[in-house]
Image (cartoon, helix red, strand yellow):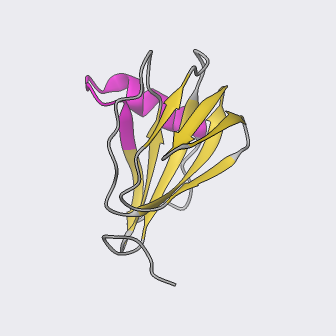
Amino acid sequence: MIPLKVGLEEAIVTLQSLKVVYPSTTVMRHGTMSVEYFAPKFKDIQTPHEQDELYIIASGKGTFIRGDEMVPFQTGDVLFVPAGVKHRFENFSEDFGTWVIFYGPEGGEII
C-alpha cells in the first residue's frame, strides 16, 4: 500500500540507516510517480534521469545548475528538470536535503 504520509525526519533516518554510495532513498511510489529523499554530502554525482523531475528543497541552500542555467536555491524552493537534462547541486550547505519527485513517461512529458 502507498503511504499516506512520509515525514522529513522519517526520510532522513531511513537514508542514514542505509549504507549506500548514492545518498537517496525512495519513500513512495505509485504508477509512474516516485518520491525520493536526496541528501548528497560534499559532491552531487547524479546523471540525467529518464523522467521529468521536481526538487522540493527540504533544508539548506546552495547553487543549482540545469544545463547552462544556474540559480541559487534555499529551503522551500521548487526546481524543475526535464527528462534527460544534465543538472546538479553545487556549493550546498551541510544540512542540504531535498525531496525528488519523478513522474511521467520515459523521455518526459510532451506538450
Left or right: 22 in relation to 81: left
Q: Position of residue 21 (x, y in %)?
A: 26, 25
Nearer to us in this view, 102 or 50: 50
Segment colored magenta: 8-25
Q: Is residue 91 above or below residue 111?
A: above
Decide whether residue 43 is among the magenta residues: no
Left or right: 54 in relation to 85: right
Nearer to us in this view, 20 or 70: 70
Nearer to us in this view, 95 or 71: 71
Left or right: 55 in relation to 21: right
Q: Position of residue 2 (x, y in %)?
A: 42, 64
Residue in the image at 40% along x and 30% along y: 15
Quarter of the view holding residue 97 = top right
Q: Position of residue 65 (x, y in %)?
A: 54, 39
Q: Position of residue 93 (x, y in %)?
A: 61, 18
Residue in the image at 36% along x and 74% along y: 31
Image quarter hosting the N terminus:
bottom left
Residue in the image at 47% along x and 29% along y: 39
Q: Is residue 1 above or below residue 91?
A: below
Quarter of the view holding residue 23 = top left
